[in-house]
Amino acid sequence: RCFLLNLNQASNLLDLSKKKSYLADLYALNKPSNNTVGQPMARPTHWIQPLDMFLNINVDAAVTRNRGRGVAAAICRNQGVFQGASAIVFKGIADPPTVEALAIREALALVEDLNLQSIHVASDCKVVVDNIKQRHLTSYGAILHEITDHSHSFLRCNFVHEYRSSNFEAYNLTKHVLSLVVCRRV
């Protein structure tokens, strides 16, 4: 009888141990962690300064839904100080990645006009930046080829992706220029 009682207690202790282990696992799964896997990253809400010796050029593009127009804009800064801006309105081009590639091409033209050599071109369109870096074949491949060739004329030239939240000035410029007539503004 004593053995049976001890066996019964051992069984209860084993069940209790399993329950505690199960509860500990549940607690660990529900506990907030510092692990960012699967969690969205906090996006910057301010201008991101490039590496030393580089001038920052933020680009953006916008398209109209019903008028078949696109705008490409670029803003150049040196350590946060405005150096110049350029925007161009295209009629008949309303494909967002194509217009974003044209914005990057416009940035290179602006930099050449300003006679600069070390540039950091930031776009909020990751697809286009990746296509430039990896030389993917796209419907706007001729523009990407022109960008790549033109980038070799500079001492240093980087293409990077930045979120729109840190690219707000170029975004605001494109929205303003979208309402204007077709032409280039420097």
Image (cartoon, rainbow, N blue to C red):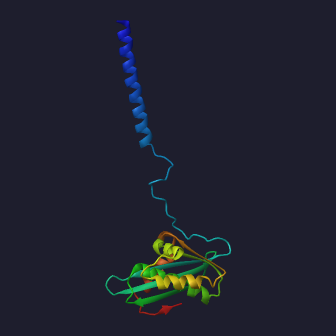
Q: Is residue 145 left or right of residue 179?
A: right
Q: Nearer the viewer, residue 172 or 8?
A: 8
Q: Nearer the viewer, residue 10 or 108?
A: 10
> Where in the figure is residue 75, as x and y percent of width and height?
55, 81
**In the rendered view, would you say 118 is above or below 19?**
below
Residue lying furthest left: 66
Residue lying furthest front: 137
**In the rendered view, would you say 159 is above or below 67?**
above
**In the rendered view, would you say 5 is above or below 54?**
above
Count of all numbered marks drawn on residues in the image: 0
Residue at point 60% right, 85% down? 111
Residue at point 65% right, 76% down? 54
Can residue 178 be seen here? The reply is no
Res 137 quadrant in image: bottom left
Can residue 12 be seen here? The reply is yes
Res 27 quadrant in image: top left
In the picture, the quarter occupied by the N terminus is top left
Q: Is residue 185 left or right of residue 83?
A: left
> Where in the figure is residue 174, as x and y percent of width and height?
45, 82
Q: Nearer the viewer, residue 165 or 23?
A: 23
> Where in the figure is residue 57, as x and y percent of width and height?
57, 78
> Where in the figure is residue 105, as x and y percent of width and height?
52, 84
In the picture, the quarter occupied by the C terminus is bottom right
